[in-house]
Amino acid sequence: LFFAGYDSFAGRKTMNDRLGKLKKRRMIKLKSVIYLISMMTLAGCSGQKQASVAVEEQSGQWILGPFVRPEGVNPVISPQPTTFQCPMRKQPVRWEESDTFNPAATVKDGKIVVLYRAEDNSAQGIGKRTSRIGYAESTDGVTMSQADAPVLFPSEDDFKEIEWEGGCEDPRVAMTEDGLYVMLYTAWNRNLPRLAVATSRDLKNWTKHGLAFAKAYNGRFANIASKSASIVTGVKDGRLVIEKVAGKYFMYWGENAVCAATSDNLTDWAPVLNENNELREIAKPRSGYFDSRLTECGPPAIKTVNGIVLLYNGKNGYKEERDPAYPAGAYCAGQFLFDANDPYKVLDRLDKPFFVPEAAFEKSGQYKDGTVFIEGLAYFKNKLYLYYGCADSQVAVAICDDNIDSKLKTHN
């Protein structure tokens, strides 16, 4: 083919096209190498532990990171023997003596506030204890002051049916421009996990609004298993706040697939449906990858100059469908890039996780297969603070200060 066609115009064009494609592939590889070297250099120069990075053929221009674990500070939240009078048990309860994990994060009055899931010692096994939401705050994002009592918990209220006796689990929190904090959490009655909504002005006193999908489509989705909601946010006036997409509030949600929902008021949400009037599944687990079992939405999605980035928790499979580079059943963190004008369109997706279980406390505890379960993302002093659950037992933090403002879509 080379000798027969090279001297002809068509042959030259074909050869030039191939050479152009080859150069393009080499350029992508070169960009990938430069990106990875820069991340490792940054981690080394800062004196911090090197961050987990995705080692693969991609330019990485849109990826948020690297997220680096500060040396010698993790875990930042651990179980405490504090007691409060439980309205459900009708007695004092050591509400966080067993485990503290899966945190939300936001900023208020110059402090990072972390709202974390805490479990008592009422039973043994994942999902069998009662969960409540605890409160911690920090002026530096690392040194935490934990409150003695939970701020959201199963109580003698209108929500006993959805919260007793499993409790309130796995919060994600985002803030409106006028300072209203919106929490989406899992209401667990030990029968069916369902997304529920609460709001607050001070992050300590919360108003429960019930199930997120209770009213949509005449209650059609009120009684389906649902969890893990990530509201779309963006940076405005130096704060990470909730933003609308095409005139509506928008969130990604789900664990078995990435779904979507919209809202006009942030408390009542309507799942997005496909042409068959069923839940629209935007992205799914992939056989042979770190997310072969689950693609569970993480902290609030964030608008960037390249599109909407959704950080998520990928669960590795147990058999031939898993990625053998990671332990079976391990939770590692990935990233999606969605089109800012079409939030259902996946523009890119990491093939390797950007964050994996490394420390001993991330691979021991309740979940020994290894877990870095990301749920909290705070924009604080021009850095991103990522808070995550460690093996369903403690809370840790990783920080990104790698010129992050150049990637975020900021406006005044």
Image (cartoon, rainbow, N blue to C red):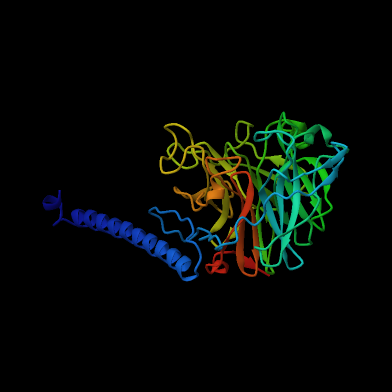
Q: Is residue 177 left or right of residue 6?
A: right
Nearer the observer, 65 or 83: 83
Nearer the observer, 354 or 133: 133
The location of residue 107, given as percent across then percent down, is 72, 62
Residue 255 found in image quarter? top right
Q: Residue furthest left?
A: 3
Q: Residue furthest top?
A: 191
Residue 307 found in image quarter? bottom right
Q: Against 17, is 371 above or below?
A: above
The location of residue 409, given as percent across then percent down, is 60, 64
Q: Is residue 102 left or right of residue 157?
A: left
Q: Is residue 175 left or right of residue 228?
A: right
Residue at (36% x, 59% y) in the render: 28
The location of residue 170, given as percent across then percent down, is 68, 44
Nearer the observer, 282 or 96: 96
Residue 228 found in image quarter? top right
Nearer the observer, 323 or 221: 323
The quarter in which the C terminus is drawn is bottom right
Q: Against 396, is 289 above or below?
A: above
The location of residue 230, given as percent across then percent down, is 65, 49
Q: Is residue 153 left or right of residue 118?
A: right
Q: Residue furthest front?
A: 81
Q: Against 41, is 106 above or below?
A: above
